[in-house]
Structure formats: structure tokens, C-alpha cells
Image: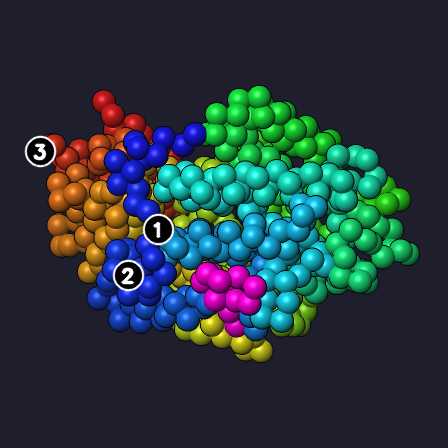
Amino acid sequence: MIDRRSLLAAGAAAFWAPSARAETAGAPRFTTTNASWQAAYDKALSVLDGNVQTMPRYSHPVLIEGSAYQGIWMECGPHESLVYRKFRPDVAKYSHMCFFELQRADGQLPCNNKVTETGFGQIQMVVPVAATAWEIARATGDDELLNATYTACSMWDAWLLKHRNTRGTGLTEGFCTYDTGHDNSPRWAGIPAQCPNKDAKLFPSGYNLPWLCPDLSATTYGARKALADMAKALGKTTEADRWTESAEQMRALILSKLYVPEDAAFYDLDANNQFVKVRGDVLTRMCGEHVVDQKTFDDLWTRQISKPTAFWAPYPLPSIALDDPKFVRPIPRNSWGGASQALTALRAPRWMEHYGRPAEFGQMMDAWGRALVADGTFRQQMDPLTGVFNAEDPTGYSPAALVLMDYTWRLAGIDETPEHLHWNIRPWHPAAQGAVFAMTTDAGKAAELRYGKDGATLTVSGKAVATVGGTGRITTDKAGRLVSATGIDLKPQTITLLANGRTTRLALKPNGTQSLTA
């Protein structure tokens, strides 16, 4: 079981009652003297507050997609609520529990819960709901969420194995366009959007279906890893071992059957065992679940992701590679045929940090942040070459608002991981102008980063940790003890670190890390 006593003693509070005023009282606080950035940030929070709604067939508030999408989708809604959880912890919990409470007796999770209906016509999964729920339960010591997640996601895995493994390979199969959420993508050109009769157990005939899908299989892999961790927390050692083994089996199948090393790409494999060779954001979805090891990632990075002619556009990351002949232009509304999507940007922290690319991620965050501030409407997608958002898209899209909120903190503020605090110091950035970042950590500590004329001052529970001059990341534990310094700029940087009465100069290479524990 999760040790609730130790977690709660460390300050992990129970979820507040669903009152808007109560929820915002303990929320993270960001202020800057840059009026444009502050106005856009405040508007992003207003968009998110407005998108917290109570939907039919479920009695608690959830974070809906917003814009043209009046509902919550399993592909993205739980992950979005995880990003938002420091502002609305109740909404983060309920945005997961709604899927579990609406689960069918045979184990099928709904693909969405909309104003008009609860959908079961596709599986539509990307970020594993098991993984995001586990992250919240672990951070907050919520046994109710832990137990509900473990039960529901175990049943879901069994449903997928029964109904989405018709070819007997062990990989997770795609039956329709909506399964992967790739609306209007050349990946699924000509394939029906939804399963026949809105029944995700059925696939239409005549399209070389089912496909073996790398990203759907990666989602299953990520869910099994989370289930293994949950089983350990619940004291189910044998089950934990079984989940770990099944996860590794899935990973091995993905790499052996769906990865083409000579292309440095993952592809769907149709029912005739022919690859569907379209290079799109499937690649980064594989990275998001850490399917590839560091060596393979470095190859993908060099040959695909970091290439300006492929995915590293001025405004990363296009949903189809720029140099893929299937890239769709002009870019239409709601297009996974080339546009840089806010959802892809929101998922980027799940892999860019894991594979050691904080400097390049900073470049991406800066581009997205400036584009969102300049536009100010929070729409779904933009042109990867110009940074112009599609005017046809309705405004008030939750993922876009979350990108600005999350990126602001990751660019120039504090980012919390299960073990550490990352203090991201970029004094040159617009968001950092006269800025103050203040938050309560999961350990119940008050963390503050304040920019001033003498540098950036780091404090935990009112106690000075360090003062930093220059651009770099300082990592501490939750109590504020120094751990390491990391280069987060594309160019080498030299920072000054005043800590424990001593000033140290550190030369930081891009993505390089130095220990500060000595």
C-alpha cells in the first residue's frame, strides 16, 4: 500500500471540496513585469477555469477540451488534468475517475464523455490514463484513486488483449482513424473515422485492417509499467512482476515488428503485413512512453526529430514531417496532417527531459510561448513554419492554455518531479522580467524563485537555498539541498552560484550536468 502516513505527514493534503474559491487559494503564483506575458498567462488560467465543467452522466467537475470540443477524451483529458493539478487537485482526480465510473462491465473504458454522449466507438488513447492517474495518486497519497485506477486499468488491459489483438501478435491494433486521435491525417487516409455502429470491437472490411499500431501499443506498454508500479504500492508483488514482464514483452514486439532502423521510423503494419510509411508524430509518442533506449533515441534525434527539414521546424513539432510527401498544405482546421498541435507540445516534457534534451526543449518552449502570447486566443494548432495559429479554429482550447502555463514555469520557474525541484533560470526571457514564481510542493514546502538585480534567489520554506547569476538549471531535493547544475541553453553558459556563504563559478555545456553534492 502507499504509506499514507508518511506522505501526508510530508504535506500531501487531501483533495479540497469542489469550490472554485477554495481551489485557487493554494494555487501556484506567477507574476512578471512583462505586461504581455502576464496578460496572456492570466488569460490562459481564465480559459482553464472556464473549461472546468460538470458533464452529463458524471457528477463531479472535470477539465474539458474546450474550443469546439465540449467534452473530455481519454486520449488527452486525464493528462491535461495532471498538468493542471496544482491549480485544481479535485479536477485532476475527477478527470480520471469519470472514465473509471463510466467503464462498462466487460472492461471497456469510454473514449470520451461529451455533452451529447459517452462514446465507445473507438479506443482513442495516447497518454496512458493508468500512468497519469498513478502519478497523481503517488504524489498525493490518494488510496481511493490508486485502487480505482488499478482495478479499472487492469480490466481495460484485458479488454484490449481480447478485442484489439485479433491477429494474435500481442500488439495493440488500430481499427479506425479516431483510435489514435489523428483526425484528418494522411496516416489514416481513406479509413473510416469511427468503428462500425460505434462499436470499438468491430473494424470495417475492405481497408487492410486491423493495423498493428506502434503508438497504441506504446500506450499499452506505458500503462502496464504504471500497473506494475501500482501493484508494488499495493503490496501485490506477484502481480507487479507479471505486469513488468508483459510490459517488456510489448516493448520487444514493438521494436522487432514496427521499427524500421534504416528509416529511423516507426510505422503501422497493415493486415497484408505492409508498412504504412507516413512519418508523423507517432515517433514522439514512442518516446513519450520511453519505448526506445537512449542509443536508439539518439539515432531518432539525429536523423529525424532534430532535422529542420523534418520535425525541428521553427515552431516544433509538426504532426507530419515537413519533408514527407504526405504533408498537407494548405493546412486545414483540425489537421494532424502537418500542423504543430498544442497536444504534441503539451506531451513533450514526457520525453525531452527523459532523454536529456533540456536545452533544445527550452528552444521549443520559447518558440511556443512567444507564439501563444502573440496570438492570445488559445487555438488548437499552428503552422510549424510561421507560428500563425489557424484562424478557423475556435478559441479557448485547454491544451493551448496549458502549454503556456506549463511552459512558463518550465522556462523560467520551478518544475517539480517526484524526487526533486528543478529551478530553471533564464534571466533573459520575457517571462522572467521582475518575475516571482511561488508554489507549494508535494512535500508541503513553500518554494519560491525570485528574479532581482543581483540574480535569481531560490528559497524553500523561507530559507535561502542559493542565488544564481546567469542561465542554467539548479536541481535540489524537496528540502532545498543542492543536487546538480544543468546547461539548459543551446550555447555554453557560465553561472555564478552563491550558496552556503560561498560563490562558485560553473561552466555549463548544453545538456551537461554537474554534481553539487560534494
Residue 335 seen anywhere in this rendered image of the structure: yes
- Label 2 packing within 10 angstroms: few (<14), some (14-19), many (20+): few
Q: Give the mark nearer the N terminus: 2 vs 3.
A: 2
For this rendering, which residue is in front, 117 or 255?
117
Which quarter of the figure is the N terminus placed in? Answer: top left
Q: Quadrant of residue 128?
A: top right
Residue 350 seen anywhere in this rendered image of the structure: no
Q: Secondary structure at mark 2?
A: helix
Residue at 77% across, 44% down: 163
Which quarter of the figure is the C terminus placed in? Answer: top left
Residue 22 disc label? 2
Residue 15 disc label? 1
- Nearer the observer, disc 2 or disc 3? 2
Q: Is residue 329 magenta?
A: no
- Whether residues under marks 2 and 3 lie with C-beta atoms below 8 angstroms apart, the answer is no
Direction left: furthest residue = 501
Q: Position of residue 194 (x, y in %)?
A: 75, 61
Residue at 71% across, 42% down: 160
Q: Quadrant of residue 117?
A: bottom right
Identity of the amino acid at label 1? Answer: Phe
Direction right: furthest residue = 206
Q: Position of residue 471 (x, y in %)?
A: 28, 46
- Whether residues under marks 2 and 1 lie with C-beta atoms below 8 angstroms apart, the answer is no
Magenta region: which residues?
A: 54-67
Q: CA distance from mark 2 to mark 1?
A: 11 Å
Q: Is residue 62 magenta?
A: yes
Q: Write down the residue under mark 3.
A: 501
For this rendering, which residue is in front, 291 or 78?
78
Q: CA distance from mark 2 to mark 3?
A: 40 Å
